[in-house]
Amino acid sequence: MSYRIGIYLKDEKYLSALSGFLAQKLPDTEVLPFRSLKEFSTVSDGDLRVVIISTLLNEGLWLRAMPALKKAPHILLIAFPDGPEITDDIAKKYGADKLFRAPLSSNDLLASIQQILAADEKKEDESQLPQETVESMQDLFHQIDSLDYYQLFKVTADTDQDQIKKIYLDLARRHHPDKFRNAPPEVRRIAYEITKRVNEAYSVLSHPNRRKMYEKMKRENPELKRFDFRLKMRYEENPHDTIHDKQARRFALLAQKAITEGSLKQAMTQLKMANSMEPGNEYILSLMEDVQKKMNAG
């Protein structure tokens, strides 16, 4: 099975040497050396299986690199003596599988990569999607636009919050995109869209004021299916309450601050990170669209 490995190090000589070594030792694997953050950030979701990156990046570059890192299931960090102090716990916080310290043994790094790839191949063999799972997801996806939030959750308007939360967690677990990283692109897209709609529904049904407004809107328009988060509704709420992941909420708040200060590129970086942590959140996506419009307008 063929995989792609991306390497992003600041030291050009070290980057070339390590890339050449791995390319020679992993003949069935494509090794991609990235020489700039812009080049590294252009990788698409699922393009890379392993990312090898230096801890010499400053905090600003780390923030900009994180969205691309999230696209690879495995991260290996290399700590250099002249870089920041980093521990195994800090490496784990960044989502790294393992931390290496320079000077390091290339063979140790190679062994770790081989173990990762072998484990992934075993998981892929064991986790082939049953056809009935794919068909069930396709059926839900094809009818999702005709379902209101209650129909999506298969509950009624008088269902209590505890039951709605239980159903939400089950739907989120079954359809989260992370479960379908190795699935065909169309299945991954369907999983993403279903998760996006499930998160949207829960952000309404789990919020008492928003739920009341949704029911009022449905009484006025029985054909209504979705809540429009961009409408200026007359009820008190914090829009960040729609973000359930704590880290995603923190990055959204940082983005909001950057927008206020006029730092649109920084805001977009923060929002991309928030979106990678909670895919499809309507509030995050609306902020990204607004920021992009402002950036396009100059």
Image: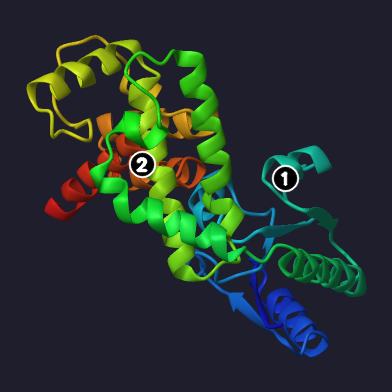
- Quadrant of the image occupied by residue 159: top left
Specify the amino acid type for callout 1.
Pro
Front in this rendered view, residue 151 or 290:
151
Q: Residue furthest left?
A: 220
In-image side of 214 versus 1 (left or right): left
Q: Which residue is identified by label 2?
A: 197
Q: Give the residue displayed 47% in from the left and 40% down from the top.
A: 278
First in sequence, mark 1 or 2: give its number: 1
- Contact between marks 1 and 2 (CB within 8 A): the answer is no
Where's residue 5, x and y in %?
66, 74
Specify the amino acid type for callout 2.
Arg
Front in this rendered view, residue 236 or 210:
210
Quadrant where the N terminus is found in the figure: bottom right
- Quadrant of the image occupied by residue 207: top left
Q: Which residue is identified by label 1?
A: 84
Where's residue 90, x and y in %?
74, 39
Where's residue 158, x and y in %?
35, 13
Eyeballing the image, is 290 above or below 39?
above
Question: In terms of secondary structure, where does tag 1 sit?
Answer: loop
- Dot in front, 1 or 2: 2
- Quadrant of the image occupied by residue 189: bottom left
* Viewer can see residue 203: yes
In-image side of 156 versus 128 (left or right): left
Q: Give the residue displayed 69% in from the left and 53% down from the top.
A: 55
Eyeballing the image, is 288 above or below 56?
above
* Viewer can see residue 81: no
In-image side of 56 versus 189 (left or right): right
